[in-house]
Amino acid sequence: MGSGDEVNLPWVEKYRPQNLSDLISHKEIISTIQKFIEEDRLPHLLFYGPPGTGKTSTILACAKQLYSPKEFNSMVLELNASDDRGIDVVRGAVLSFASTRTIFRSGFKLVILDEADAMTNDAQNACEEVS
């Protein structure tokens, strides 16, 4: 991303925490997640709570801590489930992403389903099949 792009970013993106140590709240949760990352044993996680409490920022900070900027796009798939909420997305995009090998790194890939509660019931059930 060039410096011109950075100027036009919304503040919520421009100042979003870049790693877990940048987060200023939920110390116990952050500590637990940090321990999972250090042990290379990140389980499936479900973050819930009211809007603006740092759910998306937390998982994106995890992703940025796990993967270098070069690896990020090949190892992390972020979908806003309120936009991409159908079963076709889960069976298509998510399954394709999860099953594709990467040349940069071995290990697990990260699929972020933001606002997953807005997904259709069929799509939520298909997520269980993929994982």
Image (cartoon, rainbow, N blue to C red):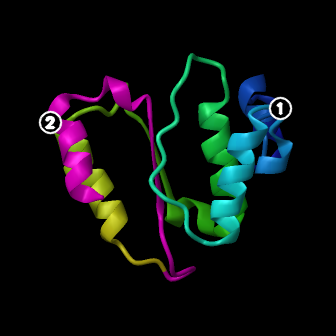
Please state the horizontal and vertical placement of residue 20, each as a whole percent of the image.
77, 49
Q: On the picture, is 123 further left or further right than 75?
A: left
* Pointer 1 local density, CA inside 10 Å: few below 14, some 14–19, many at least 20: few
Amino acid type, label 1: Val
74 is higher (above) or lower (below) than 77: below
Foreground of the two, 7 or 51: 51
Q: Does the magenta-highlighted stretch encompass residue 116?
A: yes
Q: Which segment is the magenta one?
A: 103-131
Mark 1 sits on what residue? 7
Amino acid type, label 2: Asp
Residue appearing at x 55%, y 62% in the figure: 42
User: What is the tally of numbered marks visible in this picture?
Assistant: 2
Residue appearing at x 52%, y 64% in the figure: 75
Residue appearing at x 63%, y 62% in the figure: 36
Circle 1 SS class? helix
Give the image quarter of residue 9.
top right
Q: On the picture, is 88 further left or further right than 117?
A: left
Give the image quarter of residue 54.
top right
Foreground of the two, 79 or 127: 127
Q: On the picture, is 11 further left or further right than 109?
A: right
Foreground of the two, 1 or 107: 107
Q: Does the magenta-highlighted stretch encompass residue 98?
A: no
Residue appearing at x 30%, y 52% in the figure: 93
Please state the horizontal and vertical placement of residue 116, each as a whole percent of the image.
37, 32
Residue 10 appears in view: no
Disc marking residue 127: none
Give the image quarter of residue 49.
top right
38 is higher (above) or lower (below) than 55: below
Who comes first in sequence, dot 2 or dot 1?
Answer: 1
Circle 2 SS class? helix
Mark 2 sits on what residue? 122
